[in-house]
Amino acid sequence: MAQTRLVRRLDIWDRLNDALRAQGDRLLLAGLWLFFLTFGAWAILTETDAFAIGVVTGSVLALGAIGLTLIFGILKFAHFAHGDSMMLAAYIAFFLLTGTMVGDRTDTQALPFTLNDLPGATERLPWIDAFGGGDFSFGYGLLLALLLTALVMGGLFVILDRLVYRPLRRRHSSIVILAIASLGIAISMRSVILVFWASSPRFYVPGIRPTTDLPFDVRIVTDQIFIFVAAMLTAALVYFLLFRTKLGKAMRAIADNSDLAQVSGINTEQIVIWTWVISGALVSVAGVMLALQARLSPELGFVLLLPLFAATILGGIGSPQGALVGGMIIGISQEVAVSFDFISPGYKFSVAFVILILILLVRPRGLFGAKA
Amino acid sequence: MSFPAAIRWKGIGWQRLITPLAFLAVTFAVIFLPAERSGWNFEATVSFLAFFGTFVAIYAIFVLGLNVQWGYTGIFNFGILAFFLVGANVAAIVTKSPAEGDFVQYVGGFGDDLNLLPFLDSDQWLPSIVGILAAMAFCGVLAALLAVPMLRLREDYLAIITIGIAELLRRITIEERELVNGTRGLSGIPRPLDNLVEAADYKYVILAISVAVLIIVYFAVERGIRSPWGRVLRALREDELATAASGKNVFAFKAQGFVLGAMIMGIGGALYAYAASAIGPDTFTHFFATFLFWAMLIVGGSGNNKGAILGAYIVWGLWVITLQIQGYDLPDIISGRIFFIRDFILGALIVIVLLLRPQGLMPEERRVSIWVQRHAGDAPSPRAPPGEARAPSD
């Protein structure tokens, strides 16, 4: 009799435990969402300027993180060359646009024909008159340069995959070996930038950039509106590609379970190549937007790794929606945090690290991540 | 990939020649270039080699620490900078006198209080030893703090976390000026056994100290790795599940490997502070303080302590050779950017080694115990394992 009761009690306890655990996970997720949304709402009300800039920074980070999460999800390794690829792409666009690189000692024109030479390419694109404010700082030349850069970077990524990552994959190297190889590539990319364009910061268009007044007394640089819109459009394009095309379906299948995808007739190597092409394009958009938002500087690439990985992990590895949300959260937190008096602007990129640690402690699979 | 048959003849694979050839080439360049540049001045060349040797020994200590973490335990630490920075700064503020002057501020400064045995000239050595111990302690605690939440996660998460902590600590030393003097950095760090010889000859003293510490660390690590404890580390690197199934607490062993490696890096950081005598934010860049050590380990051969030291020698050799080459009359287009080209070569070197010789110059020795072979020598047994080193199968 007593024994049965004990068993029954254990049984109830077990069930309660299971129920709590299942609910606890949901509760935790709800709590995290509540926390980030409250923080966002509070930031909109009290730190509107910082919030607006945070949204712009966040959209750049989100673009980078979407590419990173695709590589992470499909190729399974941490691509440490992502930040430096973004910077390299930004410099390639700069080169196509202006043809400038360092010669013996000083800058020289290295290209016989640049995109800025096209008729009217430097004429500033107009910002919609009805909203008021100044025009964008760049002409359609930059957009052309961006398109060409996307092709170049996509090609470069495919070549690097053929030369480096595929032989390592074929040898069944661990993901860590691939990550170390990507770090070596990151260092090489950074030094390529230094060799050709030296270390001093550069800009696509020199001089002061026009600003626009938004509602609620927010004044931002007009280019930042472009950055936000372009990032959202690109993200929508990626969403369409992943969820509305056959290629996207195959990519998601491989990210889910690559063995299963392979036995169901998906050509993994082909999908890998497409992944690199898409990542190359995303890296180019992200890099050019970053350079437009901040500047062109070789050192920015490595520093950016931390916010990028934080956004990826916060959103959940392999989840593009997660990367978008994660990038936004990281970008906004960074800008809002350094607008406080007691946090020095030098800690800007450490904010991402703190969020990363917190998320890894409470929910390592992130906001959108699938169960490990 | 073909090579003259004469060299392949009788099973002498040309790959076997890479290690001695690389060693000889670097040695030749490191002796020839400074000798030639100084007009065959013996004094100057020896002095250059003493500096070179000191830093090779110090960096080799870092690489040994990394080897314990990555080579033996399989922990992916991309933030060697964090331990370098903590070790060097802790050793500096322990050994220095208290801060004075308007432009110098830092915490600590116990150097004068540590002269506990004046009759043994303890001001010459005791603070330095305490500095090394404190550096080890701080690095160990930092590693333990990181290990507790992070070692249970996927291995690449730890790489990102360690990059993050390195960047955060770097930022803190820059932003919190009263901690270690901000961007100005710390200079005039007391040197151990300073009054033993004349200032001009001190380089030989620090060379001897660094090499002695390296030898101690080397034998300590070798002893540890060849013990049952070390075999558990290597086992869990290969297969955590199998190790756990044989009743080992995987997490505890991983944490021990991580902490031990971090403490060794702390020793390296302290010695660097003594040898360089000045440290600052410029010293602690991700490229120099993390990537270079990884390059040394990958080139030398992860999982082999001798390889770790050889890697430090070869990579640092390449590093200083570039400095020497820069002195020659090069065209502007190269001399202005020779350092960037060097960075490129190092980045490419890592990738090339991973692709063509993943085991590094000195592959890991795959045998359980040296005694098996010796025993087999006495009484030949068909089950004696091959003594030859094998490439790790990743």
Image (cartoon, rainbow, N blue to C red):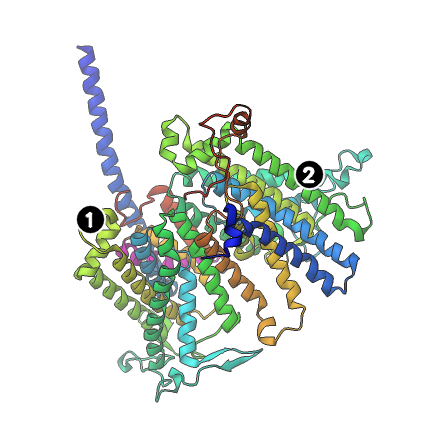
Residue picked out by circle 1: A263
Residue picked out by circle 2: B129
Closer to us: B116 or B285: B285
Closer to us: B242 or A42: B242
Q: Residue at x 32, y 49 (%)?
A: A35
Q: Position of residue B177 (x, y in %)?
A: 60, 54
Q: Amino acid at mark 1?
A: Val
Name the main secondary structure of what is drawn in magenta.
helix
Residue reaching furthest to the bottom: A119
Residue A55: say if magenta.
no
Element under label 1?
helix
Q: Position of residue A255 (x, y in %)?
A: 26, 51
Residue reaching furthest to the top: A1
Please name which of the two marks, 1 or 2, marks the residue nearer to the observer: 1
Closer to us: A144 or A54: A144
Any part of residue A87 in sight = yes
- Disc ID at residue A134: none
Q: Position of A73 compared to B333: left or right?
A: left
Q: Residue at x 38, y 41 (%)?
A: B153
Residue A321: say if magenta.
yes
Q: Amino acid at mark 2?
A: Ile
Chain holding disc 1: A
Task: Name the image quarter holding the N terminus of chain A.
Answer: top left
Q: Position of residue B132 (x, y in %)?
A: 64, 40
Which segment did they paint magenta?
A319-341
Distance, label 1 to label 2, CA atoms, is 61 Å
Q: Position of residue A339 (x, y in %)?
A: 44, 60
Q: Residue at x 26, y 56 (%)?
A: A321
